[in-house]
Image (cartoon, rainbow, N blue to C red):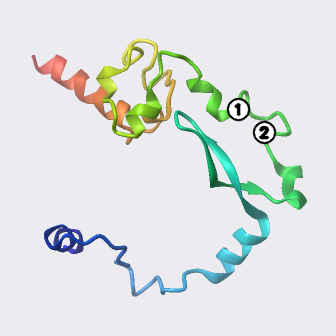
Amino acid sequence: HSCIQQLESGQAEVVNQYQRSVRKPGNIPAQDLIQEIFEVVDQSWRGLGPIPNSGLGLRPAYTIHDAQKKGLLPTPLQAACNTTDCISGLILQGIHKPHDCPAFGTKCTPDQPLGAPMVSSEGACAAYYRYRQRVAIAS
């Protein structure tokens, strides 16, 4: 209801729909814990590249728990899309559609995703992939 009212009035704002449970200041103990453990860092985002001050990293006192530094992750997360076939960054920015990607449905599938939009079931590429499959079956 609130979203429709905002759309009709040309407004865009965050509205707390859970006022009985969620207060304006939020969960202060959780926020304090996040501040203690994490710090704002420059982050490289799969398909988009580095964006200053856009991520959270462990503070030095907690880096002993860093799975990447311990070698517990097979590759850096952003490495999966380092191929010229993957245009996930352009898809995430709305410049291209999933079917414009040369890897879509061939080298890049939900079982073997190259970019973030195919990883999540809510991603644009994954949704296009599933919808395309249904259209092909219906035809």
Instruction: Check if mark 1's residue and mark 2's residue have beta carbons within 8 Å.
Output: yes
Distance of label 1 from label 2 (alpha carbons):
7 Å
**Is the residue 92 above or below the residue 4 in the image?**
above
Foreground residue among 109 and 76: 76
Q: Quadrant of residue 76?
A: top right
Residue at image location 38% in from the left, 33% down from the top: 91
> Is 74 situated left or right of 110 in this image?
right
User: Residue 92 appears at what percent x and percent y?
Assistant: 41, 39
Q: Which of the image's four quarters has the N terminus?
A: bottom left
Q: Residue 76, which numbered label?
A: 1
At label 1, counting other C-alpha atoms closer than 10 Å, the crowd grade (few under 14, some 14-19, many 20 or more) is few
Check disc 2 and report the residue beneath it: 68
Q: At 86% across and 38% down in the image, what residue appears?
A: 70
The answer to whether 71 appears left or right of 16 in the picture is right
Location of the C terminus by quadrant is top left
Label count reads 2
- Residue type pointed to by label 2: Gln
Q: Amino acid at mark 1?
A: Pro
Element type at marker 2?
loop
Q: Is residue 117 left or right of residue 26?
A: left
* Residue 104 image offset from top left, x and y in percent: 38, 19
Number of the label disc, if any, that sits on residue 63: none
Instruction: Identify the image quadrant of residue 83.
Output: top right
User: In percent of the image, x 18 and y 67: which residue is there?
Assistant: 7
Using the image, determine if residue 11 lies above or below residue 74. below
